[in-house]
Image: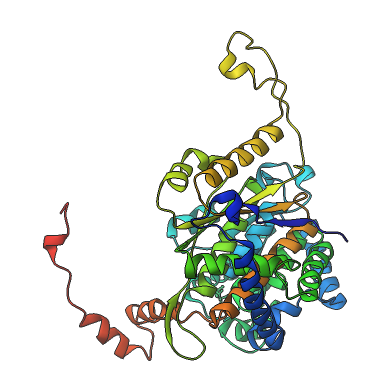
Amino acid sequence: MDSKLKFDFNNMMSQYVGEKDGFTVHDLEKLDVLADEAAKAFSAIRGQGMTEWSILPEPKCELVSEIKQTAKEIRNDCDAFVVLGIGGSALGPYALFQALSHLRHNELPRSRRKAPKFYVEDNVDPERMQALLDVLNLEKTIFNVITKSGSTSETMSQFIIIYDLLKKTFGPNAAEHIIATTDADNGSLIQIAKEEGLTTFLIPKGVGGRFSIISPVGLLPAAVLGIDISAFLSGARYMDTICKRSNSIYQNPALAAAVLQYDSFTNRGKNISVMMPYADGLKTMADWYCQLWGESLGKAVNKAGEKVACGQTPVKALGVTDQHSQIQLYVEGPKDKVVTFIAVEKYKTQITIPGGYDDMPAISFLSGHTLNELISSELLATEYALTKNGVLNNKIVLSSLTAESMGQLVMFFMLQTAYAGELLKIDAYNQPGVEEGKNATYALLGRPGYDAKAQEINSWPKKNSRYILGT
Ligand code: PA5
């Protein structure tokens, strides 16, 4: 395999973006030393504890064959495949679906889709659940309930509702409609799966939700869609090999991206990371990145227990759509962002703009150009406008959207995040900030053992009606 991904950071350099915020060659030399330390720190923990994700690309023929076999049966027999999950347990499968399937997959006739319709249900909005139930033919539907912890309230609520419905509809055959993807020992789902005899795929112990895209969490739904998961894994392996080879920012693209971003938010006031792909297929990949970067690096304390309150706020934007929404702010507003573009060199199709408006020079110049040229030129133009205005930006260039390039991209992002975690000296794999809200929800819904939390919530100052308008 060759490289399907290039990381271009020219526009982070002072000679292009200006001296105020731009990096000098001297800065890079200093950062290369930091990068080396961070890469060594990551190598020391690689594959252990919650970094088991980093060894997932290694060939696992048995698992891959099992996934492919299950997927083949689903592809042949089913009309719909529904992922029930949230956070990393939903965004990974959804990102791969959008990047690698037809952009109107569900609207295509079965003969062209060659796979079931695909749904990712990552919310507990009752209207959304009802809407899903309204369109499914249960008899021809498989639900893949995905939860690492096996107890996430949102996912388990969805599961309980669906399984109850399936039991009422199909009696003892209900289990045939569910596949569980979860931890081997922890949580309620594995217990239920064993009791009910559900087909089950295991998420390795040291793989958290946002790092699970290359585990059965991402692989099974992808295989059901007909995505070549062996090529996806090879892509991830290729990127890992490239990055493992060197601890220098001049050779390790994920390390370079991590260090530049790290220095931008710790020393240059760039508290926002905008991820802006110029491809509709990568819109959810940008969401996946936002979760990975935000939840991994946003931490109150470092590994030594010192208060750090660190992190960089990730924001998704879509080129060219958001040029008509966000770019005004990015170009002229506060200089608190690093914009990362994702370019695609070769789109799967080419569409030419026909002629016919020769007397209207404001639009006739478009004739004969392709939409491919238009989108690529708009990306270059936006890069130029940002750089000219002193806004730090860089670009990930993908040769095209394929299983290999997606493997390289997700590994690039996960390694970048891991290196950034080591630079910040934080635990990038926990999420204690999510717990407070989860515990408060349990207390509000009367979960046993949460009485103290319920009391704490009840003793919180009552809201003042003076500050609530419209009543
Ligand atoms: O990255 C994470 O760990 C989280 O965002 C989880 O993916 C999310 O909370 C869902 O957790 P689970 O897979 O345990 O249901």
Residue 296 or residue 420, whichever sits in front: 420
The residue under the point 73% across, 66% down is 250
Across and down, in percent, residue 113 comes to: 75, 47
The residue under the point 87% across, 75% down is 61
Judge whether residue 178 can be spotted in this image.
no
Q: Where is 124 relative to 42, above or below?
A: above
Q: Is residue 324 left or right of residue 166?
A: left
Q: Please identify the quadrant where the C terminus is shown.
A: bottom left
Q: Please identify the quadrant where the N terminus is shown.
A: bottom right
Q: Where is 261 relative to 246, above or below?
A: above
Choose top left, top right, bottom left or bottom right for residue 65.
bottom right
Across and down, in percent, residue 350 comes to: 76, 34
Choose top left, top right, bottom left or bottom right for residue 63.
bottom right
Residue 27 or residue 70, whichever sits in front: 27
Q: Where is 30 relative to 24, above or below?
A: below
Q: Is residue 136 left or right of residue 442?
A: right
Residue 256 or residue 221, whichever sits in front: 256
Judge whether residue 123 can be spotted in this image.
yes
Q: Quadrant of ligand 1?
A: bottom right
